[in-house]
Image (tube, helix red, strand yellow):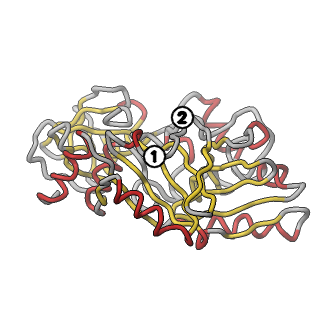
Amino acid sequence: MNTESLEKYIKLKENKIGFYEQKRGLIEVSGKEAIQFLNGLITNDVVKLESNRWMRAAFPNAQGRLLAVARVLRFDEKFLFETEEATHEKVFQNLFRFTFAGDFFVEDLSEKFSYFSVRGAAASNFKYKIPTGDEIIGAVFGDESGFIIRAFRADGFDVFVPESSKEIFVNELGNSNAIEISDDLYEVLRIENGIPLYGVDMDETTIVPELGIDGLISYNKGCYIGQEIVARIHFRGHVAKQLTGLVFGDASAAIKPNDEIKSSEGKNAGRITSVTFSPELEKPIALAFVRYDYLAEETELKVGDLTAKVKNLPFIE
């Protein structure tokens, strides 16, 4: 992390608001058969999702492997799927193919909204009402309506602003002396918060339960694509490996993605996926897939000659 980013990091932790704009996918699904079709595609149960609430869900393939993780937002009888940019097109095509099968409509709204992550110790003092839990808060930007939801594993919230009102919102951020978060600073915050990134920490080789995200999977609903594999792992008792955190004791430790992790006995214990230095912890940290036998917090593991301890995610509450 460069000096400028470190200064911004300290300000965010002390008394500032920060914002980070990024591309995300936003896909609307509606129709009388929407719930029926959606419940056959994703791991969570949209029947139980109340209006103006959101849930996390995964799209698995037939082998239970991950196509995408999404947030599902419900507005009465309409659903919005919010995805990473990397999985946006995949999710859209996965949904759109069912529009020919029944009363099921899909519209890509990604270009109609801008997406901002608002972070920092003072984020709760911003002018808009801040959601708690899984609620969705409507917000008006100029004459246009958008919405706000609480961030996943992070101190802050995520804002969806109509593209036509983007300048108004950016000006409001400026009036609040908000700091623009750079790409490298956001990467530090992402890893500290234990947020996996598709194509880096997860991909189509990942079996959905290996992510270890609470509330991602319903084990009580009807059949969906990949359910047999996902359920088998659950009722077997545990996954073979899971995404978790590692904290290194040596502040100068040189570690990198794909480094092999070993147990104290020299057995393979997993691999690293993302690495950064945490200014708050004053130590290098990593996201990693660790084998089940070594997942207990504080378990000591080795990466080369370096020692690390397992840390449940997120690193920083």
Q: Which residue in the protein does label 1 denote?
A: 127
Task: Point out residue 66 in the picture as x, y percentages from the top left corner.
Answer: 57, 55
- Which numbered marker is on residue 72? none
Left or right: residue 267 compared with residue 131 = left
Q: Is label 1 in a helix, a strand or a loop?
A: loop
Query: Within the image, what quadrant is residue 52 found in?
Result: top right
- Three-letter code, disc 2: Thr
- Considering depth in this image, is 40 or 75 the residue closer to the camera? 75
- Considering depth in this image, is 73 or 196 the residue closer to the camera? 73
Residue visible at 62% across and 33% down? 234
Q: Residues within 10 Å of mark 1 (few under 14, many from 20)?
A: few
- Considering depth in this image, is 259 or 186 the residue closer to the camera? 186
Calculate the distance from the C-alpha at mark 2 to the C-alpha at mark 1. Answer: 15 Å
- Tag nearer the camera, 2 or 1: 1
Quarter of the image where the N terminus is located: bottom left
Task: Point out residue 13 in the picture as x, y percentages from the top left corner.
Answer: 25, 41
Q: Is residue 30 above or below residue 110?
A: above
Left or right: residue 239 compared with residue 291 = right
Query: Within the image, what quadrant is residue 317 found in?
Result: top left
Left or right: residue 312 compared with residue 298 = right
Residue visible at 32% across and 36% down? 315
Query: Within the image, what quadrant is residue 33 found in?
Result: bottom right
Q: Residues within 10 Å of mark 2 (few under 14, many from 20)?
A: few
- Three-letter code, disc 1: Lys
Q: Is residue 136 above or below residue 141?
A: above
Q: Earlier in the sequence, mark 2 or mark 1?
A: 1
Q: Is label 2 in a helix, a strand or a loop?
A: loop
Task: Point out residue 137 in the picture as x, y percentages from the top left corner.
Answer: 60, 44
- Which numbered marker is on residue 132? 2
Residue visible at 42% across and 43% down? 156
